[in-house]
Image: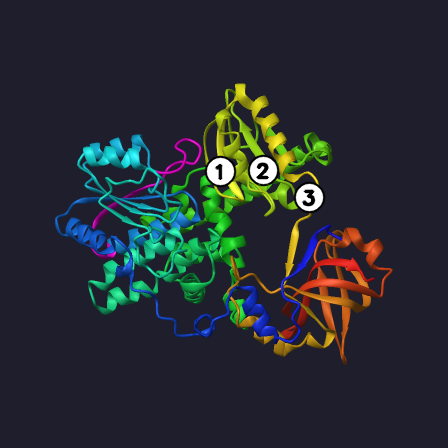
Amino acid sequence: MLNKNWRILSEDSSLDLQTRLLHNRGLVEKNEIEQFFTENFEFHDPFLMKDMDKAVKRILSAIENGEKIVIFGDYDVDGISGSAILIQTLRFLSAKVSYRIPHRMKDGYGLNVRFVKELADLGVDLIITVDNGISCKKEIDLAKSLKIDVIVTDHHGIPEEFPVSAFAVVHPGQSDCEYPFKDLSGSCIAFKLAKALLKTKNNTEATALIENLFDLASLGAVADCTSLLGENRFIVKKGLRVLHDSRWRGLSLISQNAGVLNNKKSLMDLYDTDVIGFRIGPRINAASRIDDPYFALQALIDEGGKAEFFAQKLEELNNYRQNIVKKALENFENIFAKDLDQEFVCIAEHQDWSSGIVGLIAGKITDKYGKPSFVMEDRGDVLVGSARSPEYFDVFEAINHVKKYLENFGGHKQAAGFTLKKENLAKFKKALKEFAKNKLVGKDLRPVLNIDAVLNAEDLNMENFRLIEKFAPFGMNNPKPLFLLKNAKIQNPKLIGNGNKHLSFGIFAQNKIVRAIAFSFGEFAEKILKKDQLDIVFHLEENEWNFKRTLQARIVDIRESF
């Protein structure tokens, strides 16, 4: 119904369901599987990370000598939560610590010359970057010339121009770094540095603080879409447990505003990463997208005891963000959507689309139309853009191909950012469309729906649901298992919800009926309501109604049975 390419990852019915799910996630070796399911994961020693010992000694020396330390974080969830971790840690250690975050629209990403000069004038001795810095060689060179040491903590791609002037670079992706897990988020690297600092104290208060930082670390790991295999998996597992009873007042208030309740009735309730990805994360991100990134950080650290004020501010900004994105999409539909059928790529610009939300707009366009999207804020002489893409197209390769028309750009395969002058817009569009056409003509451009396995009706049981629970928390590289049931016998299909937007029906499964819910499938009702058999793709879940929990299939896609 959604015009997606169904791809079944494991069709080997000789393997049991658990083995198929593990293989689909690249987990084959016995030790990998044991580690994946263990409840007693031993976190890697932070001092295995290159320059960690050097960074810790420099920070402890700065604390002892009363030097001024500034945490310089990125403006997204990963940078904000990582900054909060180090601020709380350094305050605990009685450091003279302050913080800076660049403004998304005014300052752009990363450390910049203006900040370095400002901090030098204030007599700052040490800058610690969080979730940025690895690509800031020029700025770090300047800092060194102004007698400021810089410790970089980052996880982004390592550039050719390495920041050799940095006092220390804490980044597990360095080729000569022996740290076993390479895919830590920025917040998790900050957490590792905090843990290394606190371990030097070797007392109960420091140990307790380490335990209470897991929830902040998990925010960035989930929101930044890092792999939820390996060490990240266990940071997030522990973080989600801590989140339900967080020590951090601001985070608790944000969670309450987001409707995140203390619901621990099942493992999937407890380890539901959606509470970060779709509830808490967007509220933290709303600060930098719409207004001032300091609101988010000051909420998390309860600056001045004003956690309620800052948490409420984030709620207001998130509501505003939702409204302006909705209006922008309506604007897009009215102006640009009619031409999309003839194009391989969507390119759109508007003066009312703030650069803080163009990435959100591009993502929603790509999700709906299944095409690469390049969306820009028109600032007059300059356009600031963001790109998103389905997995079949590399937007970074595309942008690199047309870089002669750009002032700057950066990103990766599925997401990128760029800036260009208005005088180059027409040439940029033409070259980008030609590149996309050459890459995509004649190819199946339908979005891919990766299905873990084909199940039979008798497989829809509580035993298999409990098995699926063991795989939580779900996220990048460990998606929530998705199944196909062919020729599903359905009963009593009906439209439900406000405006009949959703569809509900029963599925015959041996001697019982399993309820199925298909959100936003109301538009397909005419086709579906006439059928008594369908092929359905679904997640297996539990549903609670009147304090009773029952099995439920949450439908992701449907097609007519053949």
Mark 1 and mark 3: Cα distance apart in space: 38 Å
554 is higher (above) or lower (below) than 287: below
Colour scheme shown: rainbow
Which is nearer the eye, 481 or 204? 481
Q: Which residue shows up at 27% across the image and 54% down it?
A: 50
Check disc 1 and give the amino acid type. Answer: Ile
Foreground: disc 1 or disc 3: 3
> Which percent across, then down, holds residue 114?
30, 30
> Which percent across, then down, holds residue 536?
74, 63
Query: Helix or strand or loop: what does disc 3 sit on?
Result: loop
Q: Which residue is mark 3?
A: 443
Direction right: furthest residue: 530
Magenta region:
91-110
Query: Helix or strand or loop: what does disc 1 sit on?
Result: helix
Check disc 3 and give the amino acid type. Answer: Lys
Which is nearer the eye, 473 or 351? 473
> Which percent across, then down, holds residue 344?
67, 36
Residue 507 figure quarter: bottom right
157 is higher (above) or lower (below) than 490: above
Direction bottom: furthest residue: 511
> Which percent across, then down, holds residue 200?
20, 62
Foreground: disc 2 or disc 3: 3
Count neighbours of disc 1 (C-alpha within 10 A) and say few if under 14, some if 14 to 19, many if 20 or more: many
Mark 1 and mark 2: Cα distance apart in space: 10 Å
Circles 1 and 3 in contact, beta carbons < 8 Å: no
Count neighbours of disc 3 (C-alpha within 10 A) and say few if under 14, some if 14 to 19, many if 20 or more: few
Q: Which residue is mark 1?
A: 290
Left or right, 319 with respect to 46, comes to: right
Q: Which residue is mark 2?
A: 324
Circles 1 and 2 in contact, beta carbons < 8 Å: yes
